[in-house]
Image: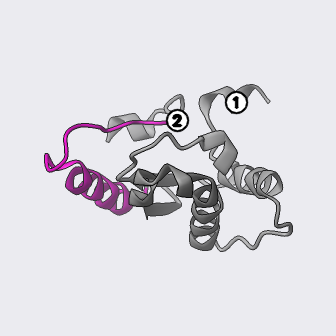
Amino acid sequence: MNAFRNAEMYMTGVWGMGGVGKTTLMKQVAEQAKQKKLFTTEVYIDVSWTRDSDKLEQGIAKIQQQIADMLGLEFKRKDESTRALELKTRLKEVKTLIILDDIWEEVGLKEVGIPCKDDKTE
């Protein structure tokens, strides 16, 4: 929990074999963070559909929309890159815990609009 209080901490990864309790652990961490009011908003997204790499490109828009819905954000434009910029701007305004669960293929966080440590220099 101390890592979530660290202003320099942008991202944490949890990975391992199936069935070892990663999802359970992250749900418990999210609940504790919520109780301690460490984040303004929590977003949990199951992205198990990334098992099918053909669906991954469509999935970027799906992830963007799910995060926007949780933030109460309505996109002004429909193209993926503009949605990513709108989402990134909003996520920089509110401290948000985003949990992407059950990832099977790499998800481009910048393509989605999730700010990364590199974005701090912008």
**Residue 92, position in %: x, y?**
68, 48
Residue sticking out furthest to the left: 20
Q: Do the residues labelled 2 and 1 touch (CB within 8 Å)?
A: yes
Magenta residues (range): 11-37
CA distance separating discs 2 and 1: 10 Å
Specify the quadrant of the image occupied by residue 87.
bottom right
- Name above or below for residue 38 compared with residue 68: above
At label 2, the amino acid type is Tyr
Residue that appears at 36% across and 54% down: 33
Residue that appears at 45% across and 43% down: 105
Residue hosting label 2 = 10
- Name above or below for residue 117 compared with residue 44: above
- Colour logic: one colour
**Residue 84, position in %: x, y?**
74, 52
Residue that appears at 48% across and 53% down: 98
In this rendering, position of residue 77 left or right of residue 84: right
Rendered image: mark on residue 120 = 1
**Residue 15, position in %: x, y?**
29, 37
Q: Which of 38 and 23 is in front in this view?
A: 23
